Image (cartoon, rainbow, N blue to C red):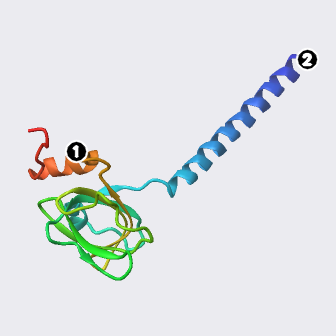
Amino acid sequence: MKSLKKQRRIQVLAAGSVALVLAVALIGYGFSDGINLYRSPSQVTEAAPEPDEFFQLGGLVKEGSIVNRDGVAFDFVITDGAAEIPVAYVGGDPRPDLFSEGQGTIAKGWYRDGRFEAREILAKHDETYMPREVVDTLKATGVYKDPDA
C-alpha cells in the first residue's frame, strides 16, 4: 500500500512540475510582445536596433522641429541633449493636445534608415509631468532643468 502512495505522490509532483514549466513558458511568450524597451537618442545612435524591432524612444521635442504633413501625420525631432533622432509620426490618432516643442515625450515605433517611424506618441498629462525614463536620460546628459527650481 505504501508503494502505491509513494508512486501517486511522484506522479502528482511530476504533473505539477510540468504544469509549472508550461505556465512559465506561456507567460513568457505572452509578455514577449508586450515588453517595449525604452531608449534615448544617444543609445539609438550608438547601437542602432534592427529595423523590425519595436521599441520606445524618449527625450525632448526639439524646438522648431515640428512639421505638419497631410492629415494627422507630422514630423519632429527627439533629442536628449547629446543626440537627435528625426521622427515621422504615422499613427492614426491626432497629435496629443499637450504635445509641444521643448516638452518630454515618448514615441513608440521602429528605427529604419536613420529615421524613427512612430506609431504612437505619449505626451505629458499635465504641466509638470515628464516620464521618469526621460528625466533620467536628460539628467545623465546634463540637459534636465527641474521645473520646481
Residue 62 in the figure: left or right of residue 115: left
Residue holding disc 2: 1
- The residue positioned 75% from the left and 36% from the top of the image is 15
Identity, as a three-letter code, of the amino acid under mark 1: Thr
**Dot 1 lies on which element?**
loop
Residue 66 in the figure: left or right of residue 17: left
Q: Earlier in the sequence, mark 1 or mark 2?
A: 2
Residue holding disc 1: 128
- The residue positioned 28% from the left and 69% from the top of the image is 48
Relative to the observer, which residue lies in front, 119 or 1? 119
Q: Is residue 113 above or below residue 149?
A: below
**Dot 2 lies on which element?**
loop
The quarter in which the C terminus is drawn is top left
- The residue positioned 33% from the left and 55% from the top of the image is 38
Quadrant assignment, res 8: top right
Q: Nearer the viewer, mark 1 or mark 2?
A: 1
